[in-house]
Structures are given as structure tokens and as C-alpha cells.
């Protein structure tokens, strides 16, 4: 899949969605790295996260309002334990699109929980359940 995205660079190197796709592939590679196998495995996982961050930042250089890139970067920052920075990106997404899918609100809920802001986390999780009751 990554090779196909490389080919699409030749067609339009300024397409933010191409960069987002590459970022998602890097995150997927990080997700399949086996947990606890070795220190090298952890380094490889961090490498994939850093690659994903670079890809999402490249997308945002093309279009500062690219919601998939903002969400991808927020997810990377969360995985890097940069919860406040991740939360800020989610807030930016809500400003750009207040009617985003309810599941997007899970991101800030997890950020609040990680920041030990229990009341805000609970309120955010409850809001998701209000919007998607089943």
C-alpha cells in the first residue's frame, strides 16, 4: 500500500490526503509491532509513530484545515503521551466541523482521562453515548 502512495506523490505531491494515507500506514505498522518482545521492538514502534507524525505534519503543510491530518496527528500525540497537545488538536477539529461524527469525541474523552480530569472525561464519554445510543 505504501508503494501505491509513493506513486501518487508523482501525480500530486501536494495532496494532503496522500500524506494522511501514508501516516495511517505508519500507525498501522506501529500497531502490529508485538508488545514486549524487545527493546528493539519498542524502538521500531516509536520510529513508526515518528514517521506517522511527519506524514500528518506534511499534510497540514498542504492544508492547515485538513481534518483527517489533524485527527491523525492528535492520535499520534496521544500515543506519545502528549495528551494536552492531542486535546488541542481535537478542539481545533470541533471548531472546523462541529458536526463531526460522534466517535471523534472519544479522542478528547481519552485525553481527559489520561490527564486525570475524571469529570470532563465522564462528560465526554456520556456525550458520545447520547449521540450514538446503540
Image (cartoon, helix red, strand yellow):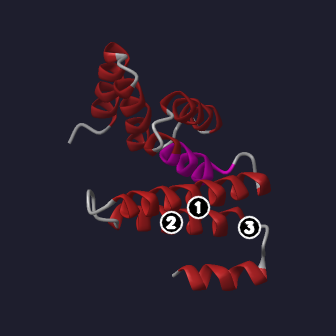
Between the C-alphas of marks 1 and 3, the distance is: 17 Å
| Up/down of 89 relative to 124, above or below | below
Mark 1: which secondary structure? helix
Give whichever of discs 2 and 1 has the lower sequence position: 2
Sort mark 3 into few (<14), some (14-19) or many (20+) by Cα contacts within 10 Å.
some
Residue visible at 57% across and 32% down? Answer: 85
Which portion, as a residue range, is magenta?
A: 66-76
Residue under pointer 1: 51
Which of the 4 quarters of the picture holds residue 112? Answer: top left
| Along the line of sight, the residue nearer the viewer: 96 or 27 | 27
Residue under pointer 2: 26
The label on residue 15 is 3
Whole-percent x and y of residue 56?
A: 63, 55
Between the C-alphas of marks 2 and 1, the distance is: 6 Å
Residue visible at 34% across and 22% down? Answer: 121
Extreme residue in the front direction: 39
Sort mark 1 into few (<14), some (14-19) or many (20+) by Cα contacts within 10 Å.
many
Mark 3: which secondary structure? loop
Extreme residue in the left direction: 134
Give whichever of discs 1 and 3 has the lower sequence position: 3
Residue visible at 43% across and 59% down? Answer: 45
* 105 lies left or right of 66: left
Mark 2: which secondary structure? helix
Magenta stretch holds residue 95: no
Give whichever of discs 2 and 3 has the lower sequence position: 3
Tag 1 and tag 3, C-beta contact below 8 Å: no
Residue visible at 59% across and 85% down? Answer: 4
Mark toward the viewer: 2 or 3: 2
* Magenta stretch secondary structure, dominant: helix
Tag 2 and tag 1, C-beta contact below 8 Å: yes
| Up/down of 11 relative to 90, above or below | below
The label on residue 79 is none
Amino acid at each position: 500500500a505504501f508503494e501505491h502512495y509513493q506513486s501518487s506523490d508523482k501525480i500530486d505531491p501536494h495532496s494532503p490526503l496522500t500524506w494522511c494515507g501514508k501516516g495511517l500506514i505508519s500507525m498501522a505498522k506501529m500497531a502490529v509491532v508485538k508488545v514486549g518482545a524487545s527493546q528493539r521492538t519498542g524502538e521500531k514502534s516509536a520510529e513508526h509513530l515518528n514517521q506517522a507524525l511527519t506524514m500528518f505534519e506534511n499534510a497540514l503543510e498542504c492544508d492547515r484545515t485538513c481534518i483527517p491530518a489533524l485527527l491523525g496527528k492528535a492520535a499520534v500525540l496521544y500515543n506519545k503521551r502528549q495528551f494536552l497537545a492531542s486535546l488541542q488538536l481535537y478542539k481545533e477539529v470541533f471548531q472546523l466541523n462541529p458536526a463531526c461524527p460522534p466517535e471523534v469525541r472519544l479522542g478528547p474523552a481519552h485525553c481527559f482521562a489520561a490527564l486525570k480530569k475524571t469529570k470532563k472525561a465522564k462528560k465526554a464519554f456520556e456525550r458520545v453515548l447520547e449521540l450514538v445510543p446503540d
